[in-house]
Amino acid sequence: MAEIYDLHCHSTASDGALSPTELIKRAHEQGVTSLALTDHDTTAGLAEARATAAASGIKLISGIELSTSWHDKCFHIVGLGIDPDYGPLAQATQNLQTVRLERAEKIAQKLEKKRIPGAFEAVKRAAGDSMITRTHFADFLLSQHHVSTQQEAFDRYLARGKPAYVSTPWAELEQAINWITESGGIAVLAHPLRYKLTANWMKRLLTAFKEAGGQGIEVVTSRISADEIKLVAGYAARFELAGSAGSDFHNPENQWVELGRLALLPPHIKPVWELLEVQG
């Protein structure tokens, strides 16, 4: 049986629609053999996911997706093969919970100024004990009929430069990579084309990422074209980074993004799972 890797997905521990148990079961149904649960700034879903993965025959890779700052812009770094009990990383996730809560209050205040009340109470109720993310606000705006899609919520209210955007003091890129690598994990730059960097800025980012100890880059993601895969593979080769593949799955209602439904990694790129095997 062919190995199917999906090294980027989310559960209800952050902004996913499925519980860790439901996520693992769906991954199994989709034929995934190795899955990394990479919730935003938290490892809270890993224990539940691990118990279900053992019963399903799926290899679960402990992961996280950390929000980081570099040159006043936010970048997401996926940590694969981390030790969730590593002290500095565990403390960082606690601190990030506070940062996200404070951001949520500020977003809600900005929405209130736009005559959209009740956002904070709604997203806090929806998130429960999980991390509050902008997706929770997008869902709220959708449920209140202020927008017709999640994407419209970002485009009109939540994205940088929009009325409810809040600049957030995330951890510095180098610090976040250190938390990952010192916990025994591998740092991977998530969805590199989503940041819409020029070629020159991408090279500067990848230089800083590599110098800080980053080892991988997501070459294959959902909804990526063959030309885009070729472009990112070029960066991987130039900076000697291993290639990762991850759907960034959040919600089964999104028919364009499915667990394990990914293009093949280009054969000349070293797969990041080979590093995980050496590590583990």
Image (tube, rainbow, N blue to C red):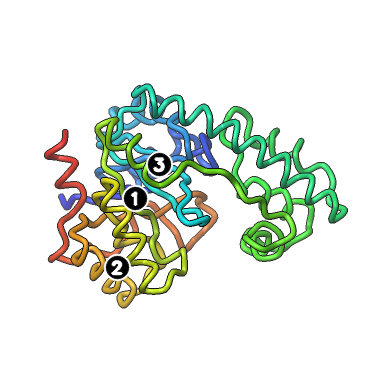
> Which kind of residue does numbered mark 2 sit on?
Val
**Label 3 environment density (alpha carbons within 10 Å; few <14, some 14–19, many ≥20):** many
Q: Position of residue 61 (x, y in %)?
A: 29, 37
Q: CA distance from mark 3 to mark 1?
A: 18 Å
Q: Are marks 3 and 2 in contact (CB under 8 Å)?
A: no
Q: CA distance from mark 2 to mark 1?
A: 26 Å
Q: Are marks 2 and 1 in contact (CB under 8 Å)?
A: no
Q: Secondary structure at mark 3?
A: loop
> Which kind of residue does numbered mark 1 sit on?
Gln
Residue 191 occupies quadrant: bottom left
Mark 2 and mark 1 lie on one chain; the one further toward the N terminus is: 1
Give the residue drawn at x 51%, y 57%. 73
Residue 217 occupies quadrant: bottom left
Give the residue drawn at x 12%, y 39%. 278
Q: Is residue 226 above or below residue 100?
A: below
Q: Is residue 266 above or below residue 90?
A: below
Q: Secondary structure at mark 1?
A: loop
Q: Find disc 2 in the rendering and name its residue.
A: 232
Give the residue drawn at x 23%, y 70%. 234
Residue 12 horizontal side relative to residue 226, left or right: right
Q: Find disc 1 in the rendering and name its residue.
A: 30
Q: CA distance from mark 3 to mark 2?
A: 21 Å
Q: Find disc 3 in the rendering and name its residue.
A: 38
Q: Name the foreground residue: 1 vs 119.
A: 119
Q: Quadrant of the C terminus?
A: top left
Looking at this rendering, what residue extends furthest in the bottom direction?
227
Q: Please identify, in this view, whether the residue under mark 3 or under mark 1 is nearer the observer.
A: 3
**Label 2 environment density (alpha carbons within 10 Å; few <14, some 14–19, many ≥20):** some
Q: Is residue 164 above or below residue 174?
A: below
